[in-house]
Image: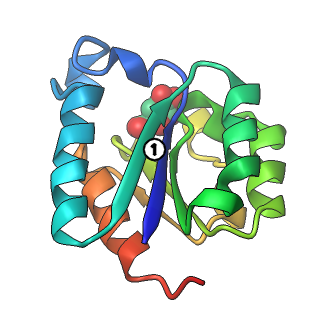
Amino acid sequence: MKVLVLNGPNLNLLGQREPEVYGKTTLADIESMLQTRAKSLSAKLEFRQSNHEGELVGWIQSAPDQFNVVILNAGAYTHTSVALRDAIAATSVPTIEVHLSNIYAREEFRHKSLCAPVCKGQISGFGAFSYVLALEAACNLKVT
Ligand code: DQA
């Protein structure tokens, strides 16, 4: 199983960004936790972050050649990006949406995810552990 983990805008600031909301764990900490779990699941994992919508779209477009599943924390683009939603809808690779925070327990503008309807599923609210849950879900998907 080859898994591509994509992180959107401002997630590079985890650890120092609104720690009361997102915790003190850095993105590097999350990657190393996931790489450890991936090894025990015999999965191969690639972890990327971008602040640019078009770069995320490009990575989703090229995923089918290299990966079986995409795990996506699109950050604020979750709530705004028709382009990301269309990229997810267009790809043959199943996408799992993740969020550190529970987006439904926060401001109203975060309650709507444009991406969720075209994703396999969504995990929201478990902090860094949301990513681990998404990886477990990814490894349980029947993919070709
Ligand atoms: C987030 C939730 C989004 O609403 C926010 O814009 C983020 C992080 C999360 O992981 O909780 O950047 O995706």
Residues 5 and 103: in front is 5
For the C terminus, the quadrant is bottom right
Residue 9, compared with residue 46, is above or below; it is above
Q: How many marks?
A: 1
Which residue sits at x=27%, y=39%? 31
> Horizontally, is 40 left or right of 30 in the view?
left
Residue 76, compared with residue 122, is above or below; it is above
Where is residue 57 shown, x and y percent of the image? 74, 39
Residue 38, compared with residue 62, is above or below; it is below
At mark 1, the secondary structure is helix
Query: Is residue 107 among the parts visible in the rendering?
Result: no
For the N terminus, the quadrant is bottom left
Which residue sits at x=23%, y=50%? 35
Where is residue 133 shown, x and y percent of the image? 29, 64
> Horizontally, is 29 left or right of 93 in the view?
left
Asked where in the image residue 117 lies, by quadrant, the reply is bottom right
Where is residue 7 shown, x and y percent of the image? 49, 35
Give the labeled residue for mark 1.
103
Residues 102 and 142: in front is 142
Which residue sits at x=19%, y=40%? 32
Other residues around mark 1 within 10 Å, as few (<14) / some (14–19) / many (≥20): some
Where is residue 6 shown, x and y percent of the image? 51, 41
Ligand 1 within 8 Å, label 1 CB = yes
Residue with the most extreme top position: 16
Residue with the most extreme front position: 65
Query: Is residue 52 among the parts visible in the rendering?
Result: yes
Which residue sits at x=37%, y=53%? 45
Residues 135 and 68: in front is 68
Residue with the most extreme bottom position: 142
Report the amino acid beneath label 1: Ile
